[in-house]
Amino acid sequence: MALELSDGEIRVLKCLGDAKKTLEVSELAKRAGLSLSSVMSYLEGLSQRGLVRLSAEDEDYLILTDEGRKYAEEGLPERRIARRALDLGGRATLQEVRKAVGMSDEELRIALGWMRRKGLGEVVAIGGERVIEVRGVPAEDSVEEVLKSLAGGGRVRTKDLPQEVLSELKTRRLVSIVQQRRRLATITESGLEALSRVQQIRVVGALTADLIRSGEWRSVYLKPYDVSAEPPRVYPARKHFYAEFLDRVRRILLEMGFVEAEGPYVELEFWNFDVLFQAQDHPAREIHDCFVLVEPSMGRLPHNELVEAVKRVHETKWGYPWSEERASRLILRSHTTAVSARFLAKRPRPPVKMFCISKVFRPDIIDATHFIEFTQVDGIYGDKGVNLRTLLGVLRDFAQRLGFEEVRFRPSYFPFTEPSVEGSVYHPQLGWIECLGAGMFRPEVLESLGIDYPVAAWGIGIDRLAMTLLGISDIRELYSRDLRFLRTRAVTSQCPL
Amino acid sequence: MPTIGVSKRDLLELVGKRSLSDEELAEALEMLKAEVKALGPDEITLEVTADRADMFSVEGIARSLKGFLEVELGAPKYPVREVEEGFVVEVDKSVRGVRPFVACAAVLGCPLGEEGLRQLIQLQEVLHRTHGRNRKKFAIGLHNFDVVRTPIVYTAKRFEEFKFTPLEGDREMNGKEIIERHPKGMEYGWIIKDKGLAPLLIDANGNILSMPPIINSEYTKVSTRTRNLFIDVTGTDLKAVEDALAILVANLAERGGQIVRFEVREGQSSKRVEPKTEHRLMTVSYNRLIEVTGIEVPLDEVVRCLMKSRLDAIARGEHLDVAVPFYRVDVMDDVDVAEDFAIGYGYNRIIPDVPSVTTRGRELELVSFSRLCRELMIGYGFQEVLNYMFTSDKKLDDACVYEKRVRVAKPVSSDYTCLRTSLIPPLLDFLSENTHMEYPQKIFEIGDVVIVDETFDERSLHDKRMAALHADYKAGYEDVQAVLYSFLRILNVKFIVKKDSKNMMIEGRCASVLVNGEVVGLIGEIRPEVLLRFGLQTPVAAFEISLSKLYRAWRTG
């Protein structure tokens, strides 16, 4: 039974047990160090279980009137007069005394009446003058004591006062009487029993290995918890959501049978542009459209056969003197098609299915939808019989595996593909999103690389697609610098990454 | 992609079809490489792909639409008047080192009006900006032919040697003044300034028509009422010059103008006739078109699709004789014809074909290995972070990382001037933005760094790294050392740790990690000076290892 007592109940019961008497509830609260309202609620519980008896009584208390307060400070007027007269030798004229104590005539009259009544002294006429004769003044006066006690904050009940003191206080209007209800609590026999049981049991907060090992856990009381209180915050270590997303894209391409490749970030213009049939004066090659480097600035061209082939294609098709120096210039690659070109330059045997997920760099304004560094997913599919329709099939398959059911295509233009196509996917909230740039590599590109089968190629700006799938509105959030966001980002069935 | 503005009313009038809904129009345009970006009550803003220079004005767009909507099929037939008496441009040899090539034509009886003039100027400007490489490769001059007296001379003079009133100007200026003070001179003067001579077109009356590629003369100014135009194109590449002229005359002819040829003479022997308006003939195999596109339709359907794309095509057995209109400067090969076939067929009608060839996918081994490392780091309680490869010289300097960096010539922002050579500085920067968050903060990143290395063709090397940082009120060497030791032991890699000294780390609390005698990583406590530079007041212990190197050891060991 004792084990059903709460911490607070035990505390209250213990105070009552220690007091060994009935306690007023406010006094109990003070001793238990609890608020009055919580003591009341504990007492309710305890009384329902018969461990405490609750009672109430109405009591009359005194409170000081203004006059009472004045006398509590100055002393009663009759005693002041008497003491004054005593100081002046036991006999003094009325005038002398009055001057010394500074009273009004009315006050003086009342004071003299009470002096007489209390037998402190008399007023006699001597030689036509009224003289006070005082025999002695007792050290204490019960009425004055009560006033002082009240002024000092003490509580005085009417029933604790002798009848004559109370009646003098009332008659002289030094106090008024108020009624107050007092709640009282007394520990019962069964309360005392419960208490003695509780006091034998140790209340324990944390269960420790020691308690378990020693077997002590059997005799302790494991304090109950507030099981719904807010716990401290903890955070899991999480994989980055965007790295996870890119991994998902990678998985899709692997499932589709593609082989992953990579290439350098610092790239020769040769691989980024020349091999891809972009003339050396093409605007995309200018300093505002790709990142030209100050260091390192010039690279080394690959083997001669390939360089000669590229030179021949440019000079015959575009009709300008092709510059090896320009082709040797180093830039940050502006598309991962450079990786596809490097891959094909090794002249792999068909079927060739390759992909690359990596960073590319292009100068741009920096805002919510543009950044200078982004991730591209490039892919190529080369084999005899591969054509524009095959390319559209691969793109649609990829988009659908990523979760976009509807895909549509329109003609487009890239310098290195013909026919070229731009694919859009349908997003229920955002509508059509253009994201799939693709085409069949031009014969000029294939000729330079020495490839004798058709190659379909595509490049996807995956950041924008990721934003729509991950519900992100600012492209910079993909590389969030907010630890709270990374730690607490919610995972939903709509967006399981 | 160039942005083109056209009037819907004008476009539909040129197409000769009024009953087209906005949706139908937008859909058709999109299938013709012209994407509708904005559709107003009358104004349509389009993005045309860069290859279709003939569609940089409404006339070309209308011409394509007419084919696609089957209003008019095949290559257009524009009337051309042959060279008449005096319609000659004499090229003086003085232009050779300055701006050697010129091509001219006149277009007569062309009702320009306001819209026509706007389109002509738009075509000129977009051509300048794109194919003309900002007027360097070619520049176009448009003139009121009524005030021009033939024959015309293309010559070059010293800048102080001539003067004329430039377009929209109120007084005569000499060449030097134009280059130095006129807005167009200031913008394009660099193209010819250092040649010492200015190219000029001068008519038989001695009037200067233009000073290419800078500005025309006010005297030959074209207005909405101009009906007879004279066009000059000058430049450094004859083909580009001729192509530009071909597009201009074709689009004016589409509006109803009549093309008149000019002869370009250089000395006694060399003569050319401009513009080149003959269709180019190509023989394309039917099989090739099907092979490239995968659209398997009969030969006559192929012919019809090509005609819809405004090419002429005649079937001859297994081959097609194709005539490519002279303004289609983008068509070089049979694949270009194949694309026109697919466009004529309609990209929206092509049924995607899912290939049946089965191949086995394979990811990069280093990617698989990185994933393994990543899983372990998550297990140690480190939060994964991704940073950009771009960083700033300042951040690397602040972190005392001194490997040779790849630096860009024109940074877009001072925050991104070079590529990171270590993952630690960007991660310190990440911590600095999260000092208000709960500690400990344990973060890691797997990513590439790029370091200048002369031994490679690209003069640089990219290295896959993994770095982990532990920041806390009391974080120390042992906190990350414990993780690194456990990590390397799980990978079963034999390693030794050797005391080292790095500016980034506290002396005596820094070490190198070696595998097979090769340094693969670095571990230590970040120096307080470095921490403070990043605004950090919490100790940070870190390690960074090269996964590329570690992987090689792991695979062989």
Image: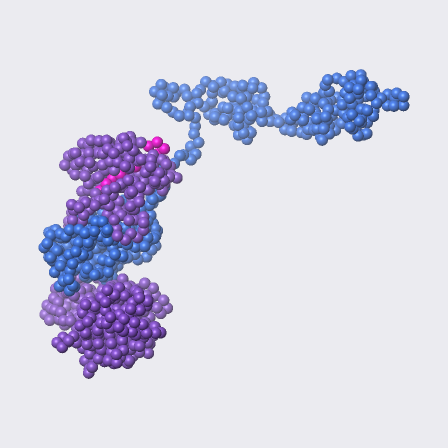
Chain colours: A blue, B purple
Residue at position x 32%, y 40% from top? Answer: B428
Residue B75 x/y as whole percent: 20, 73
- For the stretch drawn in magenta, the main secondary structure is strand
Residue A1 x/y as whole percent: 47, 23
**Among all residues in the image, which is located at the extreme front?**
B160
Q: Quadrant of the N terminus of chain B?
A: bottom left
Count how many numbered circles sit on residues in the image: 0
**Among all residues in the image, which is located at the extreme bottom?**
B85
Q: Nearer the viewer, residue B142 or B158?
A: B158
Q: Nearer the viewer, residue B230 or A317?
A: B230
Can the viewer see residue B517? yes
Residue B467 x/y as whole percent: 26, 39
Is B472 a magenta residue?
yes
Q: Nearer the viewer, residue A117 or B457?
A: B457
Q: Nearer the viewer, residue B99 or A17?
A: B99
Q: Quadrant of residue B9?
A: bottom left
Q: Quadrant of residue B223?
A: bottom left
Can the viewer see residue A262? no
Does residue A64 appear left or right of residue B280 in this picture?
right
Q: Is residue B523 above or below residue A49?
A: below
Q: Is residue A347 above or below residue B118?
A: above
Q: Is residue B7 above or below residue A443?
A: below
Is B514 a magenta residue?
no
Residue at position x 33%, y 45% from top? Answer: A480
Q: Quadrant of residue B462?
A: top left
Residue at position x 19%, y 83% from top? Answer: B85
Residue A485 x/y as whole percent: 35, 43
Q: Quadrant of the C terminus of chain B?
A: top left
Range covered by the magenta-colored residues? B464-475
Does residue A195 appear left or right of residue B532 in this picture?
right
Residue at position x 21%, y 68% from top? Answer: B98
